Amino acid sequence: MKRGGWPDSFLLLVWFNLLRRPGRTVAVALAVALAAGILHAGALTGLGVRRALAIGTARLGADLLVVPEGAAEATHTALVVGEPMAFYMDGSVVDRIAALPGVQAASPQVFVETMASSACCTGRLFLVGFDPETDFTVQPWLMKELGRPLGPRDVLVGNHILGLTGDPLRFYGTEFRIAARLDPTGMGMDETVFLPLEAVAEMTRASATLAEKPLAIPEGHISAVLVKLAEPERAAEMARLITERIPGVAVLTGGDVTRAVIRSLTGLMALLVPTALGLAALAGVLLALLFSTVSAERCREIGLLRAIGASARQTALVLLGEAAVLGAAGGLAGVAAGFGIFGLFQRAIRFSYTLPFLWPSPAVQAGVAIAVCALAAGLAVLAAAVPVRRILRLEPHHAIHGGRA
Amino acid sequence: MGMAAVALRWRGLLILLLGAATVAGTLVLDTCADAGHFATMASGMQAPMRCTWTERAVLGIGGLVMVIGLIMTAAHQAARLISAVAVASGVLLLVVPMWLIPTCANPAMPCNLSLKPGVLLLGGLITLGGLAGAVRVRRAEGAPELRQVESAR
């Protein structure tokens, strides 16, 4: 581009016009930034929750999750945000479920929560014991990624658990080693430690002498049964059948988890969307007022520009260019602030609303940021269009006389 | 009132407000109290959680930031130096929960959900406010010299 050419002069003119009243420019840009920031954070939340839900439910791999009656809500929280919990039911439930027609596989899991008293310092972790013989969620991943089953003192950790592969982890006095780390899912699995059922049994026995407080899991009891169906589309029907045939259990389907997450997300969006819309409307009104004032203040200048040969289109371009630059700058500031504040508080939002979350890919994040900036610039141009159109309708000599005939 | 004084007064008020927000937020939310302030050790003894000390340090720095804001509002003689102290206090607020007195290790504890992100946000704003103050004061200080040069011409 030739320096000093039309685009350069145009941008310089826009820039100097905006700097005439820096306080006013900053105030309007801040209003745009507020609306853009909330819009950007809302879009990131929605996209991140959708991504986590898609990856997390696929990684879970089970069509149904059978838990003791009354434990469904706690299980949902554990599945979504990894909040530790422990409850037990008789282990015979696995065989009864496996015997039902339409069940392809059923695998037991035992849930253990680490000591609440040491919560702050070591992290209160959610331990899940799985049966390597029947498991169809963790075991296939292990064989593919690690190439071997877990040893008696090996654990598989979720993506957010602190420590490197090979690092020791001590639970109830028994020391384990991190064998591998799962890919991020954005769901509770990221906060979970997986270990074979045999290791849970050994840890329980050893806790009587090694732990501050012994771990008590009734003999032969389990916490949940993961169920894979021959026909996954019949999940709701099979859930009803299981609760009818086996008393004292509750069944969670993938659809139940998705629906509950969407309900929580709707609750959050009910707060964010009206706020963003209200702020966008306020920013629009401020922009319209600003350009009404600018048009009135610069009426003579615009008239002179027209009189020395500038076309209405060129004059409009300068004024609307100012609006677009102001909107885009406010949008950019809002995107940066929204990203920073959302990044700081995203975990608090996740826990408050029980939402899964996985950052969208960089390309999607960039796309959202560009879209928000473009929207802010578009809104600013629209808000400025009416006053600019009014001033350009005046004859140059009327404009030179301040709009008077 | 000169431009420098107006600039300083606004920035002083901003710093004062941010310091007050740090102190009030820490006192009112008191996230560490939600978790009981104490952890039970393997020996059965109770010890204060790390975030108890983080919270106290944040309270102290918040108070200091308030004083800096007051001085910035009232006294303009050492404006740039005071702005630099505000920047240093902001940076101190940033490093306290991250390195100096880290909050609890468990990311799900209340201190990590609200105290730490809140302090990082306020620390960042105080740092930016201080930097903006320093730059503005430098410009405002330069302005009379420019005017003198203009009048000499």
Image (tube, rainbow, N blue to C red):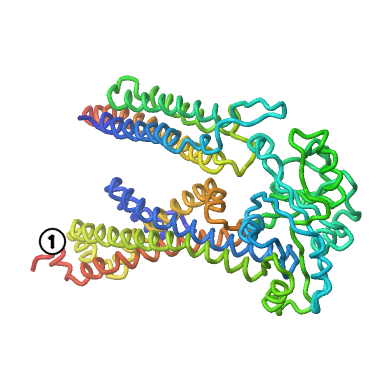
Give the residue at the far top of this rendering: B77
Which residue is label 1 attached to?
A402
Q: Could you tell me the amino acid type at mark 1?
A: Gly
- Find residue A377 and report its horizontal and vertical position in percent: 40, 62
When asked about the image quadrant of residue A303, the answer is bottom left
**Would you identify the image quadrant in which residue A222 lies?**
bottom right
Q: Is residue A306 left or right of residue A76?
A: left
Q: Quadrant of the C terminus of chain B?
A: top left
Q: How many marks?
A: 1
Residue B150 image point, x, y percent: 24, 31
Residue shown at the point (9%, 65%) measured from the top left: A404
A146 lies above or below B121: below
Q: In the image, is A137 to the left or to the right of A389?
A: right
Residue A161 lies, in percent from the top left, at 71, 45
Chain letter for the residue marked with disc 1 in the picture: A
The answer to whether B60 appears left or right of B116 in the picture is left
Asked if residue A358 can be seen in this view, the reply is: no
